Amino acid sequence: MRTLLLLALAGLGAQLVDGSLGMAYGVTSTTLLLAIGTNPAAASATVHLAEIGTTLASGVAHWRFGNVDWKVVLRIGVPGAVGAFAGATFLSALSTEVAAPVMSLLLLGLGVYVLTRFTVAGLPTGRVGLPLRRRFLAPLGLVAGFVDATGGGGWGPVGTPALLASGRIEPRKVIGSVDTSEFLVALAASLGFLVGLGQQGVDLLWVLALLAGGLVAAPVAAWLVRHLPPRVLGSAVGGVIVLTNVRTLLRSDWVDASGTAQGVVLGAVAVLWAAAVAWSVREHRRASAAEATAAGTEAATSGTEAATSGTDRAPVAAGDARGQSRA
């Protein structure tokens, strides 16, 4: 029962992050399942089965809030489904001993990318409104879908930053479109795992627990996407993913680090993570202050122009009045 409760809470937290940031449900949930000793292929299968429900709920919520570009959903989602099915069958064929460190490396790479991307660069917003071409979206969806299935997550960490970096679609629609198209990816990956694994190692109660938490969080996250600072959230989530998967790798047969070495490395990662979050908070406050100052300056300038215009009109009105009096 305790495990099911923890999974439900993990699903809730992961969906809050995913729905407001456009990434990290799969990576966060899979990382947790690996940490408690789940078979890598079974962990990814469990997460993707739960994602069928959470992504559907999230997509509906984002659609109701006007956060979805349906052209982008189809152009990235269909190739993503193809890549996810291929990735699921590939992962199903790997042995557990090989798959565990491979998946941790993939998750670690994604975590480092998310942490660095949002801490250093924040959210780029330029060239909004220009069309996104199929020759860009199709390969992106194919690669992101394959990474998502083999890494237990990656659709958002690959797709969301790439679309944001293009600067051609506003951030809220990037997040909403990526979340909505993930339904196709989760469905295809689940079919791939069922073909490769059957129900081996997949606990339906765990799937339902993750699903329950995600369903509660989905509508809240779609609303929060306009209110939470994504830069800070991205740094926080990236750090969790990096810390957890560094721990997994240090304990794997590939590294087999001593307890002291693990403590030193994990401590260093924790310090860097805290510094990244602090930097993101600082930059967010600085950007908010700059926007407030710019808005105040613009308002003051408009007021001055209005006052000047009123002063210029006053003598004219007085002259007109004198002229009418003489007449």
Image (cartoon, rainbow, N blue to C red):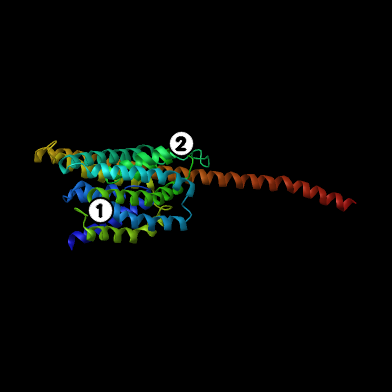
Q: Residues within 10 Å of mark 2 (few under 14, many from 20)?
A: few
- Quarter of the rendering containing residue 86: top left
Label 1, label 2: how many angstroms apart (C-alpha)?
32 Å
The three-letter code of the residue at mark 1 reads Thr
For mark 2, give the secondary structure.
Answer: helix
Estimate the x, y position of residue 299 in percent, counting from the top left.
Answer: 56, 47
Q: Residue at x 10, y 39 (%)?
A: 260
Question: Mark 2 sits on what residue?
Answer: 135
Question: Mark 1 sits on what residue?
Answer: 46
Residue sitting at the far right: 327
Q: Is residue 249 left or right of residue 275?
A: left
Q: Is residue 254 left or right of residue 60?
A: left
Q: Residues within 10 Å of mark 1 (few under 14, many from 20)?
A: many
Estimate the x, y position of residue 65 in percent, counting from the top left.
Answer: 46, 57
Question: Can the viewer see residue 266?
Answer: no
Estimate the x, y position of residue 15 in percent, counting from the top left.
Answer: 33, 54
Q: Residue at x 18, y 59 (%)?
A: 3
For mark 1, give the secondary structure.
Answer: helix
